[in-house]
Amino acid sequence: MKTTLLALLMLFGLSVQAETEVEAQACPDLSGVYTCGEEELTVETFELNGVYYLEFNGNGGLPADGAWLQLPDSEEEKNAKFRLTCGDKAPYGSHFLLDYESDLYQQGQYVAFLDAEVYFYINVNNELAQDTVGVAKGSWGEQPIDEKIVCTKKSVSPDNNETN
């Protein structure tokens, strides 16, 4: 099973601007334009009213306030929810952490519960890294999840034209 949670979030085009009193935690600046395989990804990180936000491809900022947000049900996933926070721990350093939970279905039948953590950070090579760790648990047992995606930051030339 290979699920890219980043792709799911971009697919739903979530736009959340929560009003909250949560004090901003130190979150990394991941802003930039990246190449992920053959895909281009624009990432913005910003702070608004004391809350940090993470935004992909202009689809609206996800608040790093720790509040659980519900995703719409689909044929493959139901009761999906996530929350975004910031942290600083090895081996990721300063990072955004997306906790994700979902019931997985196949042809209308429940097959597993997905529990995953997705870390977004800048690695030692100055690349955007997404590490997904977790487990899918079903009547058949457990399937560990350990997926890593690395995206190269596009540089900007002096005349403001993007280059690789």
Image (spheres, grey):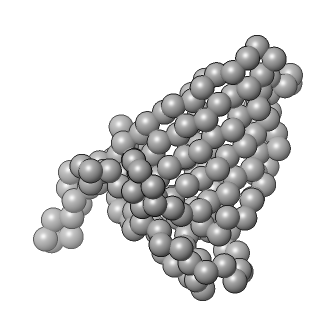
Image position, residue 153 (x, y; %): 29, 54
Identify the residue shown where x is 50% and y is 49%: 119
Residue 83 location (% of width, % of height): 67, 57
In the rendered image, is residue 109 in sight? Answer: yes
| Residue sitting at the far front | 90
Residue in the picture at 67% in, 46% down: 100
In the displayed structure, would residue 155 be above or below residue 65?
above
Residue 1 vs residue 66, the one in the foreground: 66
Front residue of 31 and 39: 31
Q: Position of residue 6 (x, y in %)?
A: 55, 47
Q: Residue furthest left?
A: 158
Q: Nearer the viewer, residue 81 or 141?
A: 141
Find the residue positioned furthest to the top.
140
Quarter of the figure that contains the N terminus: top right
Quick check: can you spot residue 41? no
Name the residue: 84% across, 25% down: 110
Total label count? 0
Question: Is residue 88 found left or right of 16 in the rendered image?
Answer: left
Q: Residue 161: x and y, percent? A: 21, 64
Lateral position of residue 93 relative to residue 9, left or right: left
Left or right, 27 with reference to 108: left
Task: Name above or below for residue 93 compared with residue 101.
Answer: below
Residue 108 falls in which quadrant of the image? Answer: top right
Q: Residue at point 42% right, 61% down?
A: 94
